[in-house]
Amino acid sequence: MQEFLAHGYAATSMDRVASAAGVSKATIYSHFKDKADLFAAIMQQLADHKFATVFDPRDRTALQGDLRTVLRDLALKMCDQAQCDERFSEFMRLIIGESGRFPELAQPYVEKVAKPIIESLTEYLAQQTNPKFKDPEVTARTLLGTMVYFVMLQEILHGKVALPLGPDRMVDGLIDLILPVAETHSHNQEPSLETFTESRPSR
């Protein structure tokens, strides 16, 4: 990881990695078939860490409390991780900066980080009944996508100086936008004919 961050993907060779690790190149090739495979393995390691610390539905303690609390905690954890884990932010800069020349760099992130979290949050939202979301996947992508852009603008692109905005304010506003839509869909449905008939005064 340190070699990729220091020199970029193109300039990092397996020889350089072997030298930094203090092992032979043959040892590295016994575990990874090429540089892309090694890069994907690093992404898997990061994904395992992020998945466990940000949102893991297998951890039932992460889903305790009301829906607003769960979603708020998830969004704030994303901000906290970006602020505390500078190495992950640097790695994201590397992926964004070099994905134009090396599209394969973005795929491990999409497959190992973004996709599992989107799918897990979608499944969690689909299980909710009060409120019931019309399209849980779109809601999940809206929440995660907004927070990813916020983190990218504030932390990775250093926008917090020119565009200061606290994470609590951002998260609270986002949750307010998401939940009323779901609550409206759930509770403000058109009245049925039976309801209308029952409400008519008797003559």
Image (spheres, rainbow, N blue to C red):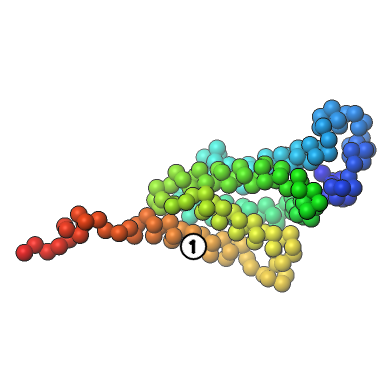
- Residue at x-position 89% and y-position 38%: 14
Residue 168 placement: quadrant: bottom right
In this view, 109 is above or below 82: above
| Furthest residue toward left | 203
Instruction: Tell me residue 71's x, y (percent).
Output: 52, 53
Of the pair 159 and 166, the residue shown nearer to us: 159
Of the pair 19 and 107, the residue shown nearer to us: 107
Q: Is residue 15 left or right of residue 136?
A: right
Instruction: Tell me residue 138's x, y (percent).
Output: 52, 53
- Residue at x-position 53% and y-position 64%: 173
For label 1, the residue is: 176
Disc 1 marks a residue whose amino acid type is: Asp
Of the pair 41 and 72, the residue shown nearer to us: 41
- Residue at x-position 54% and y-position 41%: 57
- Residue at x-position 71% and y-position 43%: 108
In this view, 155 is above or below 53: below
| Furthest residue toward bottom | 162
Q: Is residue 71 left or right of residue 22?
A: left
Residue 104 placement: quadrant: top right
Q: Is residue 129 left or right of residue 72?
A: left
Of the pair 171 and 137, the residue shown nearer to us: 137
Residue 53 visible? The answer is no
Q: Quadrant of the N terminus?
A: top right
Q: Quadrant of the C terminus?
A: bottom left
Residue 40 visible? The answer is yes
Instruction: Tell me residue 76's x, y (percent).
Output: 60, 55
Element type where label 1 sits in the image: helix
In this view, 23 is above or below 69: above
Number of dots carrying numbers? 1
Instruction: Tell me residue 90's x, y (percent).
Output: 78, 53
- Would you call the spot at circle 1 few (<14 residues within 10 Å), some (14-19), or many (20 or more)? few
